[in-house]
Amino acid sequence: MAERFVTVDRETPLLLPPDLRDWVPEDDMVHFVLEAVKGVDMSAFRVNWRGTGSRQYPPHMMLALLIYCYSHGIFGSRRIERATYRDVAVRLLSGDTHPDHDTICKFRRENKVAFSAAFLHVLELAREVGVLKVGTVSVDGTHIRANASKDCNVSYERAGELREQLENDIGKLLKQAEEADQDDEDEGERLPEKIARREKLLAKMEAARQRLEEEAKRRAEAEKKGYEEKLKAREKRTGRKKGPKPRAPKDTPEPKQQTNLTDGESGLMRKSKRESFTQSYNAQIAVDADGSQLILSTHVSRCASDANELKPTLEGIPQALGRPDRALADSGYANAAVIGEVEAGGIDLYVSVGREDGNYERNYDYRPEKARSKPPKKVTDERLLAMQAKLASEEGKKIYRKRQQTVEPVFGIIKAAMGFRQFLLRGLAEVGTEWDLVCLAYNMKRLWKAKSAAV
């Protein structure tokens, strides 16, 4: 009996043009994304309203293109451009048009307002269909690699030494160039290139030192209030103004303080002593802990610690959604001053201090394995002691248990399922825009799945 195979004919042209909608299943996410982005106000986009120059791609289509591609792990502008040719769903979304990678990158860089508007619009849709309820939220952060190498870091002291060396080199090269001009030597033709290369490096060193100096001044100003509070507490405790005082904030950089020459706003971070340092940003989110696991707020910091990130992350929840009643956070956020400010705003906080029930429970101890055998630091602040007692109760444990199962899986989905492990853009503002887009794509996919499950 002869074999029977399906006929595969690549030579005969189609009699009629194909309808791309016939090639994409009705339950594909692309249809949901196209409908969802229609509600974003046109004024949120950066558009050339004069109509001059080349024709623009429709902003809603570009927004849908980025959301759909990010939700499926396609992040680079060149890969997105390639997907408009290779991916049938993306080809349907773009209407068989093909924005080049420069256009995609420019749109992503210039439309932070549109991403914020779309972020709020998706959350409002979720609330309308009954998926979202802003009551209890979980806050957490994760380190995501910057588009820079840690090998490009330079210290304040080293930048000064290199600056002096480059100035000397430039002076010598200028003198050689002058002598070469007088002698009419061929060597003088290559000297301008060498001088320009050193001048470029010199400008980088100057910018690095200036960046560190400005950062030191900002840090000193931010720590000034805490320093004054320590002085008052010391005077109240001892009853005298004389004697050793707490160390005053320093408004000049430490010699070993570093900055990165590629992305000066990123930071050298590591999660624990067991992990190596990476050039990263600290990406923060607040997640709905009442069931939907939708991201309500995004925030990016250049600081490796979470100690000061609780308040800005909670404040980032859109006012149109209302304020949360309760917030959960791990021991990285155990900052007494911040806890006091947030609770004064009417939010019921559950922040692990690390010594609930008087013991170091594994669920609350985030120190390296070796450090767990050492006795923990004694908690003395009244606000932290009150929080410790709050989480030691049975009710407190029950409420706090929600944190791990609500916010940590979100980071797992973003990093493992979506594949987002490194920022493509550089600079705190640009990285913040990209993080907004990543979280918007996550929310869109989460809402689509919730809606599909409900049907």
Image (cartoon, rainbow, N blue to C red):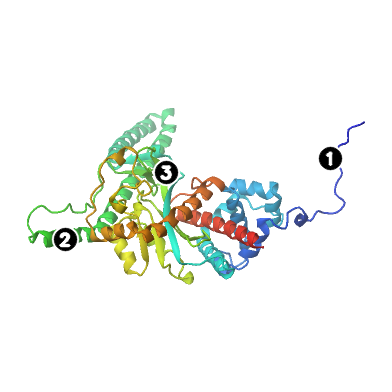
* Closer to the camera in the image, 162 or 42: 42
The quarter of the picture where residue 262 lies is top left
Q: How far apart, in angstroms, are the residues tagged by discs 1 and 3? A: 51 Å
Question: Who comes first in sequence, dot 1 or dot 2?
Answer: 1
Amino acid type at circle 3 is Thr
- Tag nearer the camera, 3 or 2: 2
As drawn, 322 above or below 394: below
As drawn, 144 above or below 225: above
The quarter of the picture where residue 444 lies is bottom right
Q: Quadrant of the N terminus?
A: top right
- Neighbour class for label 3 at 10 Å: few (<14), some, many (≥20)? some
Amino acid type at circle 1 is Val
The label shown at residue 8 is 1
Label 1: element kind: loop
Amino acid type at circle 2 is Ala
- Which residue has dot 2 on it? 233
Q: How far apart, in angstroms, are the residues tagged by discs 3 and 2? A: 43 Å
Q: Residue at x 69, y 46 (%)?
A: 86
